[in-house]
Image (spheres, rainbow, N blue to C red):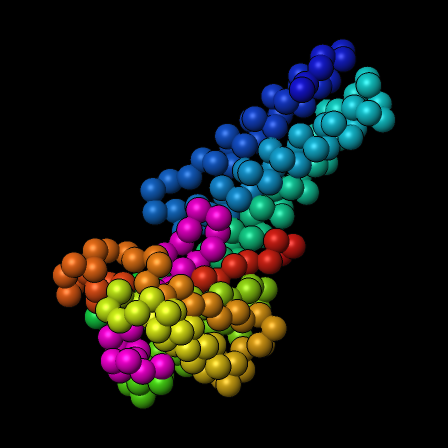
Amino acid sequence: MFVNAKGSMTKAAALALAMGLSACATTPNDPNAKAKQGAAAGAVLGAVAGAVIGYQGDHSGGALRGALIGAAAGGAMGAGVGHYMDLQQAEFERQLESERRAHQVEIERLKNENLKITMNSEVSFDFDSAAIKPAFRPTLDKVADILKRYPRTTIRIIGHTDNVGSAAYNQQLSLRRAQSVMDYLVARGVNPARVIAEGRGESEPRASNATEAGRQLNRRVEMLIIPDRDI
């Protein structure tokens, strides 16, 4: 794709690679690793786009100037998303530390910057019920508080079950549980326009349904927290 016109496109390509490698440099347990990686990706994409646009307008040096401008803009945007989700993840991990130690809640950062919070159905719902247990409400209160303070996200709440009972019944139960969590968060002040509830029933097990331990893992509600891309 990079055509050498007095070297400007070649230099722009080298610049994009150098910026990406520089921004990717992180140390073990770096709390800003996601932000740096986001900045690297944004810088490379911005440099490429800027180089192409600049080259079209000025074959002599426009590619290099465009790469510099595009890399700066792209890097800032990529770092913004990563940093925003870094801060939110740290809040969830701090506020839900006791729930995590008790294996009631899991927090995972996905490669696409989404956060996934998995809630154990054994502690959040009674058997065959979509009513949230009173003992689990304080946990959801903390989740709602954090979500309100980080409004630049969409929240997908997804219910899952084991394979005991009919698939149709399990699908409805999983949806009702997801809706219960959604309704609770909205009642605590989370903007309803940000929240979507889905039921997956028994279709996406985490473990084998052949054992009780596996079925317990499969009974869960997952919350995907998806950042806006214009942060």
Asked if the magenta segment contains residue 78, the reply would be no
Q: Is residue 159 above or below residue 15?
A: below
Task: Please provide the residue range marked out in magenta.
Answer: 108-130
Task: Report the front residue among 47 and 159.
Answer: 159
Q: Residue at x 47, y 55 (%)?
A: 114
Q: Please, which residue is most extreme toward the bottom here?
A: 134
Left or right of 94 in this view: 12? right
- Report if residue 50 is visible in the image: yes
Asked if the magenta segment contains residue 112, the reply would be yes
Q: Quadrant of the C terminus?
A: bottom right
Left or right of 173 in this view: 18? right
Q: Residue at x 31, y 88 (%)?
A: 134
Left or right of 81 in this view: 164? left
- Return the x and y of residue 54 as percentages of the image width and height: 79, 28
Task: Report the front residue among 120 and 227.
Answer: 120
- Report if residue 150 is visible in the image: no
Left or right of 3 in this view: 17? left
Q: Quadrant of the N terminus?
A: top right
Task: Report the front residue among 17 and 199.
Answer: 199
- Return the x and y of residue 11 as percentages of the image width and height: 67, 19
- Return the x and y of residue 136 as percentages of the image width and height: 31, 81
Q: Residue at x 42, y 51 (%)?
A: 110
Q: Residue at x 57, y 70 (%)?
A: 194
How many numbered marks appear? 0
- Return the x and y of residue 93 as percentages of the image width and height: 35, 64
